[in-house]
Amino acid sequence: MVKRLRIPALLAATVLLAVTAYWLLFTVFMTYDDEGYVLVSLANYAAHGGLYAQVYSQYGPFFYVLHDACHRVLGYDFTNTAGRWFTLLCWLLAAGGAAHLVWRRTRDATLAGFTLGLTFFHLWLMVSEPMHPGGLIVVLVTVAAWLGARQIEKGSLSGLAVTAGLAGAALLLTKVNVGVFFLAAAGGWFAVHFRDPVPARRLTLLATALLVLLPLVLMRAQLGGSWGPLFAGLSITASLGMLGVAWRQRTPLTSWRQAWWGAGSLVLLGALVLAVVRLRGTTFPELLEGMLLGPLRHPGVYRFAPIWLPGAALAGGGSLLLAVWAWRRPGPGLDWLLVALRLTVILVYSVACLECLPFSAHKFTMSFAVPLAWIFARRLAPVGDEDPVPGGATWLGLLLVLQYLHAFPVAGSQVAWGTFLVVPLLALGLHDTQRFIATHRADMSVLVGLVALGLAVCVAGRMVAIGGSRYAGSRPLRLPGAAGLRLPENLASALRVTAA
């Protein structure tokens, strides 16, 4: 009976979170004008083109081409209301996609519910920036993670290459740094799993060098400060740990032929988007400035450092030493230490999501969870006959540890957008932990899963309560383009007076 209710329960939870997302999104209006600037730029591009020439933007052309196409096909206008509906869709696709990825790999409704609730919470900062390209980025990364893991399970490596190429092109042409991080992760995974062992070794060494250099080059202007070296060091630690796990668990899968499929897909989509923008009045020098040169100057114009928790540097160093131990002397003692670390990280992260600790879940993720992410991708449990093809966890893990860099140079909502994949990775690590514990204490394995689900239910329930309270305590704004918004009466009155 309980098993038959698993899927309906997950669907009901998704519907409840959709309603909650609506309550939260439609009861917030930020007084800074990021939302308005994006909406105006989208409307102007749809009206007359001229991106970067007549339409100011800090973002890539894919975001504009996609919305222009949807605007023409679906007929929606670029309003505050439409922006919130788009963001709601992105939020639910990310949370639901992460949960389904975990469900597909584990067939465990408890872990799927855990992932659904905590991913939803992790991305709640999206309410502050409706229609921001960050929402689209989250969806593109989710689709790449979900579809890529499925293609790995089915052995469709050419399909995986096409997925990586298309997602890489879309991300490059939405926000160039995020696209570089994604392609670096995908390239590292392909290198590790190359069929021929000799090229695989060489390609993995090259990938290792590039993943070490990437944060150093990215943060070169901040390496003389206090936070740049720490961020770069934690990023390098996370990447080295995840690559080490991927190599230890590698299976020969990829080839040059698949790499060409990926490169071809990237070039094809990229050329199509650039051609559309070019035909709508943007010159190649303007594209170069808007897509690449302008973003390269951004760290020198504005930056906002992550808030690191005490002990972050120690955690990074400890993670690196632990990775060396796991590489050179694996054994039962190490396995039980990793179990303890996994459960501690999951517990602290989950409780932090309840916002009852002196630090936030996002700060904990940046300082501890991502630098230790490799411990959740490493297999501890015995391999079973029905286990999915290896590689899915490290695919997810590499995407996470590279998207971590999204928080540079501005660690605002970018922290949530860049690290939300930590939740499904924690869930996969918890599943492996349960199976490992079950070989010794089956009852403890079940208890661990129930505690995790209970914490996720509390987190999601708190979000539902906050959303319902905000919606009940607000009043309709009743302004054109924002008729669906409900705000506190004092703010709504001020906005009506301003608009008049």
Image (spheres, grey):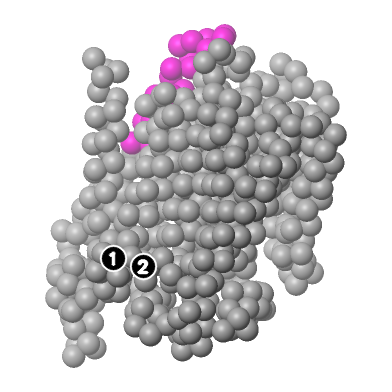
Please name whichever residue, 27 or 265, is drawn nearer the observer in this view of the structure: 265
Disc assigned to residue 290: none
Percent position of residue 235, x then y? 69, 52
Q: Residue at the spot x=60%, y=66% of the render?
A: 176
Percent position of residue 317, x then y? 76, 44
Up the image or down, 238 lies above or below 303; here it is above
Q: Residue at the spot x=36%, y=67% of the render?
A: 69
Look at mark 2 in the image and give the residue it sits on: 69
Magenta highlight on residue 443:
yes
Please name whichever residue, 95 or 357, is drawn nearer the observer in this view of the structure: 95
Tell me: 402 left or right of 1: right
At numbered mark 2, what does the secondary structure look like: helix, strand or loop? helix
CA separation, marks 2 and 1? 6 Å
Please, what is the three-letter code of the amino acid marked with disc 1? Answer: Val
At numbered mark 1, what does the secondary structure look like: helix, strand or loop? helix
Magenta residues (range): 437-457
Look at mark 1 in the image and give the residue it sits on: 73
Up the image or down, 327 lies above or below 3; here it is below
Please, what is the three-letter code of the amino acid marked with disc 2? Answer: Ala
Percent position of residue 237, x then y? 73, 46
Q: Residue at the spot x=15%, y=58% of the render?
A: 472
